[in-house]
Image: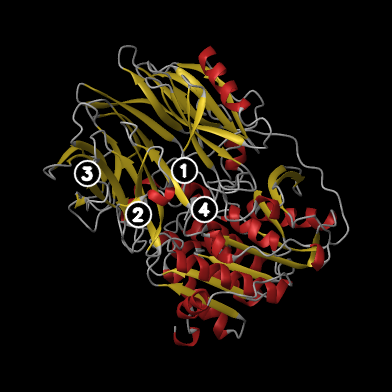
Amino acid sequence: MATQLTIFKKTLLGTAMAVAVCLTGCQGAAVLTNTHSVSVEQQSALIQMEDLFDKAQIRGVKLSKDGRFLVFLKSLNGANNLFIVPKGGKISEAVALTELEDPVDNYSWSARDGELFFFKDHQGNEKTQIFSLQFDVNDLHKTPEIKKLTPNPNAQFEFMEQLSEQPQTLVVKANHSDSGRLDVYHLNADTLELKSVHTNTLFFADEYIDEQGEVILGLVKNKDNTRTLYRKSNGQWLKVLNTLEGEDIEFYHFDKKTNTALVSANIGGRDKEQLLSLNVSNGEIQPIHQDPKDESDLEKILLDENGAPYLVTYYGDRLRNYPLQEEAKLRLAEIESQFSNEDVDILVNKIDHKEGHWDISVTSSVQPRRRFVYETQTKKLVDLLNKAPKIAPELLSPRKTIYYTARDGEQIQAYLTLPKGGAQNLPTIVLPHGGPWARDHWAYDGDYFGPIAHYFANRGYAVLQANYRGSIGFGKRFTLLGERNWGTGHMQHDVTDGVNYLVEQGIADKERVGIMGASYGGYAALSGAVFTPDVYKAVISYVGPSSLITLVESFPEHFRPYLGDWFKAVGDPLIESDRKDMASRSPINFVDKIQAPLMLLQGANDPRVTKAESDNIARALYKSGLPVKYYLAKDEGHGFAKRENKLASIHAMEIFFAAHLGGRKSADVSAKTAAQLAKLEVDISKL
């Protein structure tokens, strides 16, 4: 799954310790106009369910360090596998490097020719392991050598970087020595030696690694949702500064000569994250750049060859780039001119200044992202295996940015996807994002549910995706407004107020509104069912927690030292007053209030929202005689990664919403998908 399924700050699928960010800038809100209802004859042709997860779709295209090869992920054996093709070759000429039935999660090119590293867990258990893969650069059809590098299948390993001067050495973070602590190691990819270089007794949530692979800066997440920054001096860790509540720091570069770090941070009382220079000797802060529109946090920083700021990106409702050097301004203008006739956002992923190569992603709201390398010498774009989208963009309506005012006056930014041609009085699906320390984006595939929003709009639904309070990217104040507001407070009210806004605009039919979400979004769906039972007529919780208490109590041991922001925002069940508050916000305790039919989707191996969260509420609903469907994938974790499980879940959603909200549904679902869904269905009477 993608970031949508997150339940930790700031990404639910990364480690609990990760402090991730998203993408770019803000334009004017769309003006919603009521139009006549669209007849069945006027509606677009139905999108095929299989095209949502097209077996031929590729992702994660990366050019090798020597510029000779492209590697990408594509479905094979029902799971993402690695494929390779020479630069300039066709997708049809690509050769499979792996043929695994359990998906490859991600990979990284090695600095050494003919080598890459890939990362995967086992059936969603998040105990990620690291593998090396060596192929013959002169014969891609020769079977590659795959070697597992990590020694402990019960530990979680995180690849950090490969040392440029010692390319056999990988810097990794893992709870290998102590299950409750993530230490830093040097892993020799040739000998498999694992050498400890930093025992994380201070429980750094984030570190800065120098050229020798040593930890020289560390950031601790405190229990009161503040941070403490440390620096290493003569073998000792010294405190640099403490932040205020909700403030964060992300490292980008460190200059040893001046003892200054280039960071993205909202420290010193700032609301939005800015580009700052931070002297780690005396804590002095020098501002470098902030959002000119004061709408969003800093999203991305790119540096020049000397480590100086080169280009920055912000993301309000759309992506915005700001070049910080004249050369960057010139090159960005050259790239933008090649897409002047398209409504797209351009994200610069990375820049190889030595070769003059800009790796860019071009995103639209109606088709998957395209990847290119812009060559500054030739001023040409090199196509990175882009192909025509399986779903024709003309079948889709552009996703709109809207703003509405919540009941207490707070402005909420959201995305609205409508059926082709527009209509009024529509059945409506609300899709609260996961996290909740995440956000939704405008791009078609900016989030897991982006394409799915289009799929249901094609079925005749209005689809609302709100960046409710507690979401990240809009400043510290907005995120902190979500504290202790789960389920019955502002976070849920913002979603409800979005529904009311669409009803007032004549877009949503008040009697045909459903809610669906994953992870925190699944919790929001369950909360909608119990705390506003008159609003929703159909509810789907996808890996969503039903009890805040059992959720926190089940977290893996190595999460706990990093949960200060969690305890501050949600509560600590070890504190009696917090426990009572958490119980009052837990849907499992209010099953008697549910009126709408409910569907549950769950991965059996989910370490974040365990199977018990869905089991417990399914059992309670069944005992109360309330309508509930429950689908469990025994080979998945926090969200479904395998294609057949994904298709079965969409099939289940489509049938469910069509039955209760009245949208269109597929008439020709494959027998394989139908059989897979039947295989996933749980007999709740036997739970």
> Given contact means CB atoms under 8 Å apart, are the residues at marks 1 and 3 in contact?
no
User: Is 336 placed left or right of 223 in the picture?
Assistant: right
Mark 3 crowdedness (10 Å alpha carbons): few <14, some 14-19, many ≥20: some
Name the disc covering residue 570, or none: 4
- Frontmost of labels 1 and 2 is 1
Residue at left offset 74%, top offset 63%:
460
Q: In the rendered structure, which disc, 3 or 4, sits on the residue that comes first in sequence?
A: 3
Q: Which residue is mark 3?
A: 136
* Residue 474 image position (x, y, % from top left): 61, 37
- Frontmost of labels 3 and 4 is 3
Three-letter code, disc 1: Leu
Up/down of 320 relative to 662, above or below: above
Three-letter code, disc 3: Asp
* Residue 398 image position (x, y, % from top left): 70, 47
> Given contact means CB atoms under 8 Å apart, are the residues at marks 2 and 4 in contact?
no
Q: Which residue is mark 2?
A: 104
Q: In the rendered structure, which disc, 2 or 3, sits on the residue that comes first in sequence?
A: 2
User: Is 427 placed left or right of 368 in the picture?
Assistant: right
* Residue 499 image position (x, y, % from top left): 75, 57
Q: CA distance from mark 2 to mark 3?
A: 21 Å
Q: How many marks?
A: 4
Residue at left offset 30%, top offset 16%:
256
- In this view, the residue in front, 464 or 260, is 464
Q: In the rendered structure, which disc, 1 or 3, sits on the residue that comes first in sequence?
A: 3
